[in-house]
Amino acid sequence: MLEARRSRTVLIVLLVVAIALITIDFRDGGTSGAHGIGGRLFGPVESLAGRVTGLFTGGGNGGEVAALQKQNDELRAQLAQAQAGNEDSGQLARLLHLTAAKYQVVTGTVIAAGGDYSDTVTINVGSGDGITANETVLNGDGLVGTVVSVTAGTATVQLLTDAGAIVGVRAVAAGQGAGGQGAGGQIGALSGAAKSLGGSAPLRLTMFSTSASLKPGLKLVTFGSVGGRPYVPGVPVGTVATVTTQPGSLTPTAVVKPFADFTGLGVVGVVVSK
């Protein structure tokens, strides 16, 4: 805007000078030296006037500004896509680190989420990629859920948070790995409570032993199923957030915070073999 005001001021001054010179030349019958000077001045004035007018009418440099703005918007969109890709790549790297030398996995990406009465997602790999029902699904943070159905190119995953999901878990004491016996080998069952994809429904833990000791911060991993289906052993699940055991209760209970963020699932891995 400041540049346009300066250009307009210069234009007015040059127009005044040029008109004065042309007037002198006209009185002298066109023989005055002012004729040449006026021509040399008035030519640039016309060019400058065209450029300044273009700024206000959208032509000339205005068109260039619009083109630059469009290019800038495109570059911003590409940057946003690159950032999203880098985030997925980081998630995949964590996934491969978690499963290194333990499991063979097929990686995929979440392409749809939610059902009317279930907490599920759809991923872009299926039977054509070697995936079958009742296989463990995880990401770089921990357990995500299990495959419940497949097509040639997609698979439906029941999330850990779903009200119908029940997972056997083992407590792991501080300083022990996921495969350790930990905390006296305490085992229990973890169940979800969500009926649709919301990410806020708690996970409920019920221990099998009446003497099991629960405290906030205690880590849990999958206990494992026969043949590793639907859950392979040793996958990180979450930590005990709040102990909810009621006085006189025979079964210790707690609310568990999962490691995986179910509101931001991207790259996941399906365990197809040990």
Image: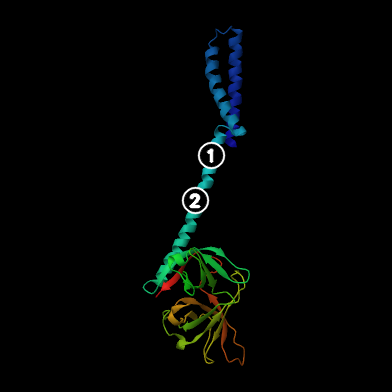
As drawn, 55 above or below 229? above
Q: Amino acid at mark 1?
A: Ala
**Frontmost residue, 209 versus 13:** 209
Q: Amino acid at mark 2?
A: Gln
Q: Label 2 to label 1, Cα distance in Å?
A: 17 Å
- Quadrant in the picture for the N terminus: top right
**Frontmost residue, 263 versus 119:** 119
Residue 233 visible at all: no
Residue 228 falls in image quadrant: bottom left
Q: Find disc 2 in the rendering and name its residue.
A: 78
Q: Find disc 1 in the rendering and name its residue.
A: 67
Please provide percent x and percent y for residue 237: 49, 76
Please name the residue shown 52% across and 70% down the image.
149
Q: Secondary structure at mark 2?
A: helix
Q: In this rendering, would 157 be left or right of 12?
A: left
Residue 243 falls in image quadrant: bottom right
Please name the residue shown 50% across and 82% down the image.
168
Please provide percent x and percent y for residue 105: 42, 69
Please provide percent x and percent y for residue 73: 54, 46
Q: Secondary structure at mark 1?
A: helix
